[in-house]
Image (cartoon, rainbow, N blue to C red):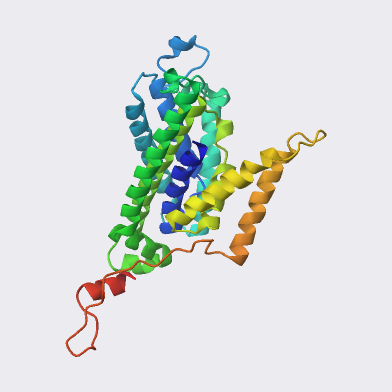
Amino acid sequence: MYLGTDLLAAWGLNLEFGVAGIANLAYIVVIAAGAYTYAVLTLGPTSGNGGFQQYILGFHLPFAVAVVAAALAGALVGVVIGITGLKRLRQDYQGMVMLVVSLMAATVVGADTGLFNGQAGLSLVSNPFSGSGSARGDWTYVAVVALACAVGFLVLRRFTGGPMGRTLRAMRDDEHAVAAIGRSVVKLRLVAQAVGGAFGGVSGALLVGFIGGWSPSAWGYPETLALLTAIIVGGMGNNVGVSIGTFVVYLLLLQGVQFLPQVASHPGLTEAFGWIILGATTVAFVWLRPQGVFPERRPRFGPRARSGDGGGAPSGPELSDSVGA
């Protein structure tokens, strides 16, 4: 289940960073937006749980409706983040601005107890499949997450493999060339932010529905860095490669260190060791293999149209494909 939600988040960030070239270091914010949206739309009124936690809205909506609403919330927050950090800024400054946005968002949510219960966060978020028995309900939830991953992968493949995907890659490689042919770079980036944010919103909704709670401590900025490492390891712009990178980073590195023996004198050393390995892995791949384990493949087009004499300049679809490439 955790692998599935991590995959959805990694694919969304890969669309923004790997395909469109947006250094979104605030991606964890859209995941949190989806988690909080799902929580407040399914928890019901605050009086229904004894009033020990305060939050806005408080509805009892069906599972599917709440997930869709979380996707829309993630898309909306992604666009808002894009508006604040994408205009007239180089990629390195984009990353700095969005990192600040991430820190500000966590600070605001933690300080305002009436929004999502402050630093204590939300709890008692119901699992929609818990009524069918513990083991059976958990595996039903896993099946739902797997279905969401399958649908998400098909949607993302269609989105990145078509004309929009080629345009986003061209913008990533040379935004001035894309602007020169009349395409708005800012609008293209906002589209990528919206679609990637929707993936993050679904990821957060499915995650909080399973674990039953969410607080500011669950969405610190290092979580975005872990997703970036998965993308760098797997291969930026390659959805299949990112899937492998997510498996390696989250299951083998971050989860694998939990099986190491604990150090009695330093209780948090094992968890910190996982982040140390993660940072070393990122640096190693950036220096030694920046294209990742599975490099992004160039798009393939149909057979080239040949002129009557076997030579001459390309024309028609061939010319369009050549320009796109």
Q: Quadrant of the C terminus?
A: bottom left
Specify the farthest residue to the left: 308
The picture places residue 267, in percent across and down from the top left corner, at 76, 33
Query: Which residue is at the front of the view, 180 or 60?
Result: 60
Q: Is residue 46 visible?
A: yes
The picture places residue 183, in percent across and down from the top left corner, at 29, 62
Q: Is residue 80 visible?
A: no
The picture places residue 235, in percent across and down from the top left corner, at 50, 59
Residue at figure coordinates x 48%, y 53% from the top left:
242
Q: How many marks?
A: 0
Residue at figure coordinates x 35%, y 50% from the top left:
156
| Residue 201, image quadrant | top left
Residue at figure coordinates x 35%, y 69% from the top left:
177
Residue at figure coordinates x 30%, y 74% from the top left:
322
Q: Left or right: where does residue 292 sit relative to residue 147?
A: right
Specify the farthest residue to the front: 136
User: With respect to residue 21, does 226 lie above or below?
Assistant: above
The picture places residue 59, in percent across and down from the top left corner, at 36, 19
